[in-house]
Image (spheres, helix red, strand yellow):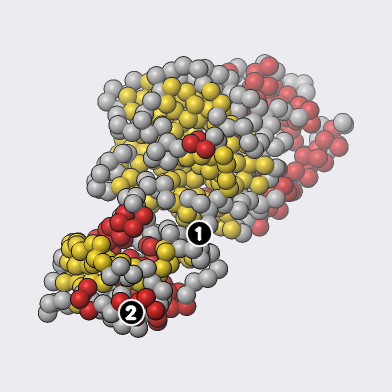
Amino acid sequence: MRMPKILLALTLTLLAVLFATQAGAQGLTVQIVNGVPSAIPITVVPFGQQGSGPASPVDIAQIVGMDLNRCGKFRTLPTSETVESPTTGSQIKFATWQQLKQDYIVVGRTTYDGGALKADFELWDVNKQQQLLGLSITGQGSDLRRVAHQIADQIYQKIIGVRGAFDTRIAYVTMVGLGDNAQYALVVADSDGYNPQTVVRSHEALLSPAWSPNGQELAYVSFESGNSAIYIQNIATGARRVVSARAGINGAPRFAPDGKRLAVSLSFQGNPEIYTMDLATGALTRLTHNLAIDTEPRWTPDGANVVFTSDRSGKPQLYQIPASGGAPQRITFQGQYNANASISYDGKKIAMVQGNGNVYRIAVMDRSLGGQETFVSPGNLDDAPSWAPNASMLLYAANEGPRGVLYAVSADGRVRQRLVLGDGDVREPAWGPYRNP
Amino acid sequence: MNATVRVSVVALFCLAAAACAKKQEVKPPPPEAPTTATAPATTEGAFTPADLQTNACLRTRVIYFDFDKSDIQSQFNNIIACHAKYLRDRPMARMTLEGNTDERGTREYNLGLGERRGNAVSSALEAAGASADQIKVVSYGEERPVCREHDESCWHQNRRVNIVYTTE
């Protein structure tokens, strides 16, 4: 429960600004639940201003610092302890930062002309007194926070050796009001919850958002017609089409890794079965033939197999079937109830909802470690795990008292960060792909 | 179970549902008219649309289920029987069975479970003489709870099939 006071204050200030400028928008707040003492110490010095233009409207260093803190692998020095303010590598007095036990330091400068923002930054190894990065990143207009997320991604990749996923987006569903007054919205936001943008609103339930591999479209289930139906909508233009509104359930859409097919669960032939749909022709290929509930299909990253939930053995468990059809193999054996899988980009880790009695938690099964499982959430009613594209973190939905909230948790479960909607429920998170593949 | 006891049980269910619904600011169901509380379920003569408002059995439009189950408990057999008779008596009548679950488990799996419950009621109605084309099943899974507390007192009210007449 450790969050530096200054950071908290900054968060609150930033939120005040956010809510003031985006009145009515569904902003999420960020709260660090716990931290990891072993995280890498890094200082992100407030950036200097370069040129005679206006000051940058976003605090790049602060956003970079929050990103690095959120992922659980770094621990930033609070601004109150940032005793010196170098803005170039040549100004860094390494003895100062060594004394503060910092492994890395980030310095930089911004140039803002009222439209475009350019940030020059350098990453230095404090002990080796060695420059690791020196880059210039430019952003336009409404996307200035992306400059900071891209800087954080560069730092993450340089130090951790894995591509960063801060400059990504998430989708989720909000619900405000009850009964006939319920208002649902499908929202897309930055990975830190900022810049929420409503994709579609409905008086009926929305669920199961799924990103297209290019990040331009969302497939989802809407009850707006009175029954479940699957839609695909372009995020930028808002254009959408119905891809399945058959009798019975039209559920659980997931784009294939090539973006050309959609795996779905449909019950028009009697009970929920897994199908793949060719998005160009609409043609269906049926994969499962069973009286059980077969749903929640997830493509493996190579597109060769589909993992899905089935209660053919009694309670729901995960099975895998070739995407071209074949015999399903059960892949989960721990826990009474396993469902709603999310597969990491490398296919090694499967996150799922695991239920035992009345407690439903997010479990991660590592297929590269013989199916070893760890819990990454405390329960009791957790749902909808969704990996970041680099599998550094997971999003999931939880209930806290009467409201639904989202958590982002590090892959090892040690750092959790709560994303809370100002008013109402937030649920059904889906972490989007990299924005520049 | 005689008619009076049966009606009392039904009234209790209605009261429980109404109490919760009221607390959650959801429209409560119409109150039980006292004149019908002791009226026996009509078993002779053909039902008319007016009976949907006055007949105690036909006015009961909710069937509840055990956790993760879709079999119909015997206590609801009389409800199935009178609605099946209504559908037999009125071949033009149509109903939608709305399948619902409690919040436990995943949303998509619960869509399947809600449908399974709707299908169970549909099958029972058909076994009692209703025609399949009079009945449509829609599953809302856990998306339409009547009660939002995270405990069994609430969950049991949400594990239900709602009978909705679309043509009387």
- Residue A95 location, x and y as percent? 33, 79
Q: Label 2 lies in what chain?
A: A
Tell me what residue is drawn at x 31 percent, y 54 percent.
A157
Tell me what residue is drawn at x 26 percent, y 67 percent.
A130
Q: Label 1 lies in what chain?
A: A
In the visual, does A322 lie left or right of B140?
left
Q: Amino acid at mark 1?
A: Val
Q: Nearer the viewer, mark 1 or mark 2?
A: 2
What residue would you read off at disc 2?
A95
Q: Is residue A75 above or below residue B96?
A: below
Tell me what residue is drawn at x 60 percent, y 17 percent.
B131
Judge by depth and name the residue closer to the eye, A279 or B51.
A279
- Residue A233 location, x and y as percent? 31, 41
Secondary element under disc 1, as helix, strand or loop, is loop
Report how far apart the C-alphas of labels 1 and 2 lie in the structure: 30 Å
- Residue A203 location, x and y as percent? 45, 48
Q: Earlier in the sequence, mark 1 or mark 2?
A: 2
Q: Is residue A27 above or below residue B146?
A: below
In the visual, does A36 lie left or right of A380?
left
Judge by depth and name the residue closer to the eye, A372 or B84.
A372
Tell me what residue is drawn at x 47 percent, y 47 percent.
A428
Q: Is residue A421 above or below residue A316?
A: below
Toward the bottom, the furthest residue is A83
What residue would you read off at disc 1?
A415
Q: Is residue A366 above or below residue A191?
A: above
Question: Do labels 1 and 2 touch, CB within 8 Å?
Answer: no
Q: Amino acid at mark 2?
A: Ala
Instruction: Let me know if residue A269 appears in the view.
Output: no
Instruction: Let me know if residue A115 appears in the view.
Output: yes
Q: Are marks 1 and 2 on the same chain?
A: yes
